[in-house]
Amino acid sequence: MSTAILTGRPVPGSPLEGDLRSLGFDVRTAPEAASPEELEALLRDLPAGERVALVDSRFVGHVHALRLGLTDPRFPVSAVPGAVTAQAGARRELTAALRTAVGAAPEARAPEAQADGARASVALASDALPDRVAAAVEASGTDVHRPELGTLVAALPVDPEARNTARQAVAAVDDEAVRLRGAVKARDGFFTTYCISPYSRYLARWCARRGLTPNQVTTASLLVAVIAAGCAATGTRGGFVAAGLLLLFSFVLDCTDGQLARYSLQYSTLGAWLDATFDRAKEYAYYAGLALGAARGGGSDDVWALALGAMILQTCRHVVDFSFNEGNVDEAGKAAVNTSPTAALSGKLDGVGWTVWVRRMIVLPIGERWALIAVLTAVTTPRITFVVLLIGCGLAACYTTAGRVLRSLRKAPRTDRAAQALADLADSGTVASAFAALRRRPLPLAPLLALVGAAAVVCAAALSPYGSAWPVIGAAVYAATSGLAVVPQLKGRLDWLVPPLFRAAEYVTVLVLAAKADVNGSLPAAFGLVAAVAYHHYDTVYRIRGVGAPPRWLVRAIGGHEGRTFAVTVLAALLTNTDFTVALTALAVAVALVVLIESIHFWVTAHKRGAPAVHDEGEPA
């Protein structure tokens, strides 16, 4: 339970107390002329682990304005005009600011600044205690989140006439409509924006009114996708049609869970992780279902190599995005301003409406990609589905990677935080770290070193017969160059390319050697191994964005990218085709068990510890 303390002179007939209770607050009223000691005593009497809000009794505004300002779990301290709140971890800062604010003289402020987006043209108070407390918290160096209210009203009228005007302004805006619009992401793909969100937002509201949580909807989306994969695995036309329809329904639920989180402000660390990882699990499970269906269908078509290739390409595309973004943040974790001509051109194109949608569709985001997969599954064959998907994702990868390279050509200083993120994304194990320790000074062109090593192991695997020692030699070269490439920090303008090159080298080597083995089960085993390792790499990204990279012991335990690559080449050189398949399966199971057990334990405990909630934003209300 959260507690709201009403300050100032009570206003007869005000619905404020009921509004606060509807948001889950227990409401208490402070004496009208309370001393600092009395207010501090009120705060001390409240349980230490709960949220506290200070709200001026004269507040007039939309309930959703209060919801945005007082219930968002992502921010330790947040405020709207006339109200300020602090989560349990920021109670000390709130109490300290209260001592400063109670004795402070009211500062005259412009009505526009106080309204903070409210459209009501009324006379506003300038002596609200919550506003002074919020200002004191900011002055102490603590960030105070102030949500964009847009057309919503949040005001402190000073007289009955102004109060009546503010109430009329509240009545003129439907805050439920604003709330529904805000549930939709501010930036999304064409298919999602025009074919899913117009009705999925209402499904999100339906879920909210029945007490469903975003995590429950996320889990339902996963279950539907798994059923879709099972239908695809039947290999029948009816199964393929059902699979396509279920995949689309899974995507509707996937949109709904995020919209439900934004609609009801049910953000959580665990929820963000589930939403992100389940998306990948759903898509790659569907790939496996299609491959099984192709093998079981009338034509008995083996498309496991295409399925694995699609998963590798999609994962590497994501790593390019992750690496570029994480490699260009400041010390506070915010995206650095890009001053390249490419960024300037992109900004100009954003002013031309149709180019925005074209560029969003070219990158084949999840909505367009899943719609493509669903339609092709229903009307064509798994082979055609994968071939079209590979072509589309390949073109999208070329477009996005070229754009990021062009944006990086202008030299910009990379922060230590960004360099550390790239080092974590590199996923270097014991072998690469040992080579890195041999040289303390950085070598120029780290991406070139990574590319040379990647080409050495991939070409050796591709150009030599199964059982040859050449892939082992190539893997040894790869281990050495990958270690030297990360010495000592990845601060070059194109160094964000290093992690994607490592991912491509490891995954493609596994694919090539499994294909060279040419026995039943080798490619499915390789698919399982790459899926387990890809999960670890996605998990690393989400940890970096939230509460920190995976522990070093975990990276060492699963070998690091170079250790796993070397191990696979050695197994291929020493074992027969059949034994190699068994070894790949065992390795996939071992990696999956280690990373899943550690990851689930980490995220569940982080959620219980109250780690900061994260989620992408919707459209400003």
Image (spheres, rainbow, N blue to C red):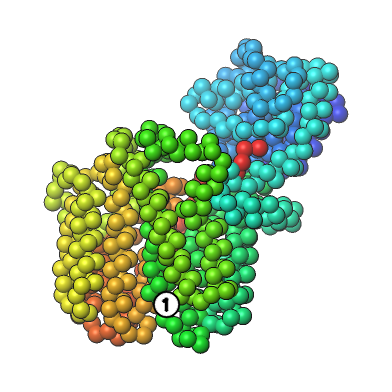
Image x and y of residue 207, in percent: 71, 56
Report whether residue 37 is seen. no
Q: Position of residue 389 (x, y in %)?
A: 46, 65
Left or right relative to 266: residue 402: left
Crowd around label 1: few <14 · some 14–19 · many ≥20 (10 Å): many
Image: 399 above or below 182: below
Counting the numbered discs, the total is 1
Tell which residue pokes out farthest to the bottom in this image.
298
- Seen from the viewer's position, the closer of residues 61 and 590 is 61
Element at badge 1? loop
Question: The C terminus lies in which quarter of the figure?
Answer: top right
Question: Which residue is the site of mark 1?
Answer: 303
Q: Residue at x 24, y 66 (%)?
A: 458
Closer to the camera, 38 or 496?
A: 496
Q: Is residue 276 above or below residue 155?
A: below
Res. 446 visible in picture:
yes
On screen, residue 416 versus residue 566, left or right, reads right
Horizontal placement of 114 versus 505: left or right?
right
Q: Residue at x 37, y 54 (%)?
A: 398
Q: Which residue reaches farthest left?
A: 438
Image x and y of residue 229, in percent? 54, 74
Q: Is residue 484 above or below residue 592?
A: above
Quadrant assignment, res 120 = top right
Give the amino acid type for the residue marked by disc 1 in the picture.
Val
At 58% from the left and 81% from the top, the residue drawn is: 237
Q: Name the residue at the right extreme.
A: 13
| Residue 100 location (% of width, % of height) | 57, 19
